[in-house]
Structure formats: C-alpha cells, structure tokens
Image (tube, rainbow, N blue to C red):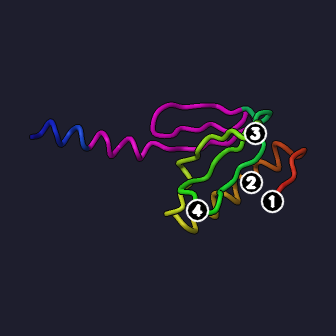
C-alpha cells in the first residue's frame, strides 16, 4: 500500500514540474516530461488561444509548444505571466508585431 502512495505522489509531482524561463538565448520550457530551449529565431508568437487550458509558443508552419507553466486555472496570475512574456518577447524579438 505504501508503494502505491509513492507512485501516486510521484505522478502528482510530475504535474508540478512545468516551468518557463525567458532569457537572451530563448524560451526554456519544461513541461511534464522533458526540457526544451526554443531559440528566439524559432519563436513566431506566444499566445493563449480562447478556450485553451494553457498558453503556447507559436512556431513556424503552424506548429506550437504548449506552456503548461501558464494555465487558465491560474486566472490573474496567468494574465500577468502572459504580459511579462509578451514584454520580453518584444524586447528579444523587436522584429515581431506585438499584442
């Protein structure tokens, strides 16, 4: 029974992993599994589509990477996080049209 508790706790902790870091090299995304650095040259936009559970990094050719670190259930925190990310996007990619 204790083993089942450890497994369940591990699964819960996986969903606490998501993180987004923004810096001169690009966007560092950690979702449930794995980390990925997305260079600024690959970023087309950072968006939060209506009805979506979380934000996303828009890439060329209609591809995207989900940003589980910014979730709709966080409401005002998610809005603040998107404002911050968009400000940094305009700083590191001034060639892109901003929101």
Check residue 70 in the rendering and tell me which mark sits there, or answer none: none
Please, is residue 45 above or below residue 51 in the view? Answer: above
Percent from the top left, x then y, of residue 4?
Answer: 16, 39
Residue 5 in the image: x percent, y percent?
18, 43
For label 2, the SS is helix
Q: Nearer the viewer, mark 2 or mark 3?
A: 3
Earlier sequence position, callout 3 versus callout 1: 3
Q: Is residue 14 above or below residue 39?
A: below
User: Judging from the image, what secondary structure is the residue with disc 1 in?
Assistant: loop
**Labelled disc at residue 51:** 4
* Pointer 4 or 1: first along the chain: 4
Question: Secondary structure under badge 3?
Answer: loop
Distance (Cα) linking label 4 and label 3:
22 Å
Which residue is labeled 3 in the image? Answer: 43
Which portion, as a residue range, is magenta? 9-38
Q: Looking at the picture, tell me which residue is in the foreground, 2 or 45.
A: 45
Residue at position x 53%, y 38% in the image: 30
Given contact means CB atoms under 8 Å apart, are the residues at marks 2 and 1 in contact? yes
Residue 99: percent from left, percent from top: 80, 59
């Amino acid at each position: 029974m204790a083993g089942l508790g450890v497994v369940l706790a591990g699964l819960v902790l996986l969903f606490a992993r998501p993180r987004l870091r923004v810096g001169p090299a690009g966007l560092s995304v950690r979702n449930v599994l794995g980390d990925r650095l997305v260079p600024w040259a690959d970023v087309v936009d950072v968006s939060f589509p209506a009805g979506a559970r979380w934000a996303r990094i828009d890439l060329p050719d209609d591809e995207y990477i989900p940003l589980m670190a910014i979730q709709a259930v966080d409401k005002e925190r998610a809005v603040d996080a998107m404002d911050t990310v968009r400000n940094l996007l305009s700083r590191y990619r001034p060639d892109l049209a901003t929101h």
